[in-house]
Amino acid sequence: MEKFIVAGEVQLSGHVKVNGAKNATLPLMAATLLSTGVSVLHNIPQLRDITMMQDILTLLGAKIYRENGSLIIDTTNINKEEIPEHLMREMRASVFLMGPLLGRFRRVRLSFPGGCAIGPRPINLHLKALEKIGAVVKDRSGFIDAEAVHLTGGEINFDFPSVGATENAMMAAAVADGTTIIRNAAREPEVADLQSFLNKMGAQITGAGTDTIRVDGVARLAAAEHAVIPDRIEAGTFLTAGAITRGDIVVDGVIPEHLFTAIDKLQEIGARLDVGSGSIRIRGGELRGVDIKTLPFPGFPTDLQAPTLAMLTIAKGTSIITETVFENRFKHIDELGRMGAKIKVEGRTAVIRGVPKLSGAIVAAPDLRAGAALVLAALAAEGISEIEQVYHIDRGYEMLEKKLQGIGAKIVRRSP
């Protein structure tokens, strides 16, 4: 397997541009199934998860082309409503196909999804939402069969503001008869981006970005063209890279309003930030410990917990991070311990006692965001680090080492 070799203690400097958001792209790709025609999505990163979603759509009958950072998706001849089991098990985001396939064919069959092992992420919220608008859902020996003679508007009240369940409900309800109200909806920017695309397709949806979404169903949707929002998690990762290396970098192509909670914490930690309309400059300073609790948007994002924890390992004083979204998202802590970090975990809380510096070590990325955290730690550590299992990192960061090289990092990718 490929690995990263990183020489640490280099102050990063220069400009780095973020890609389109993976977490917005995947549901947008799924939404194209609701139309018969050719949709075009711009600002698409080249990532393993997106390639896998392309494979699934192709097996369902779509024709997909990539041109200059855009995806051209022809869904005219979609002829299947069953998602292959081996692809479902490799990528959790394949669950996004449930709502669109149910909306198009009034039936869908899939196995339980896989993905990063960061804790249980049951899809019961997805299933209950679809049942509220007329689907009959059955669990048959590890497979889910959902069928609806008629999809009709209904009231959906989520126990937890799940992003995926909110998006699945929006897509199915877009072509249901009548009005659907989604309460305690996820407020993430990616949900608002999906609303924008669906409305371009002819849907009538309002309220995304708030906790209540209204969907007035329409008879059919048409293909559309859309540019994906910037990746706020990639942006936050680069901002953290600037802080942990005490560098001076500008992150371009961002929407600062999507990052205000992370910006506030970086300032509290000791970094200096200049926020523009589409870029953020960060200059590292003396890092100090803080307390953080991850929460659904607009709270501190769980996807930035691991990179931020890596930074706090060399901050003065003691920091406390409480992970409220995923219960098994501290798998990077043992690896950081190999580099000299002092961290104690009690349930969903990590207590980090800052050390003067980390030391290079051989570590392995246990999942996507944990892998990014290990890269950041290696950038700040004394000596050479080797980061194995970088295929996890490739799921969410397009050629991360190339972008880091562009701002001065000494990092290379090595094959066996």
Image (cartoon, rainbow, N blue to C red):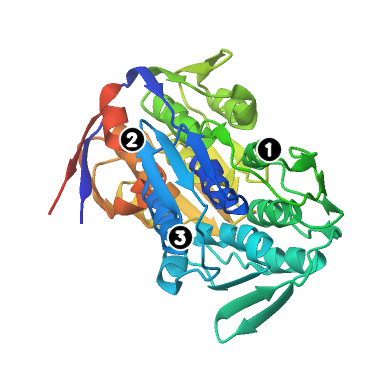
Q: Is residue 144 left or right of residue 154?
A: left
In the image, residue 277 lies at what x, y percent?
Answer: 58, 14
Element class at badge 3: loop
- Residue at position x 74%, y 54% in the image: 175
Provide the residue designation for mark 2: 357
In the image, residue 218 lies at what x, y percent?
Answer: 78, 49
In the image, residue 102 lies at what x, y percent?
Answer: 66, 64
Q: Pick whichever, 378 or 232, lies toward us.
A: 232
Residue 60's label in the rendered image is none
Q: CA distance from mark 2 to mark 1?
A: 41 Å
Mark 3 or mark 1, which is nearer to you? 3
Q: Quadrant of residue 177?
A: bottom right
Which of disc 1 and disc 3 is earlier in sequence? 3
- Residue at position x 36%, y 50% in the image: 48
Check the image and report above or below for 367 versus 259: below
Q: Pick whichever, 168 or 67, lies toward us.
A: 67
Residue 316 visible in the picture: no
> Which amino acid lies under the numbered mark 3 shown in the image of this protein?
Gly
Check the image and report above or below for 52 versus 252: below
> Which amino acid lies under the numbered mark 1 shown in the image of this protein?
Ala
Mark 3 or mark 2, which is nearer to you? 3
Provide the residue designation for mark 1: 192
Q: Is residue 195 left or right of residue 152?
A: left
Element class at badge 1: helix
Residue 61's label in the rendered image is 3
Check the picture and name the quadrant holding the C terminus: bottom left
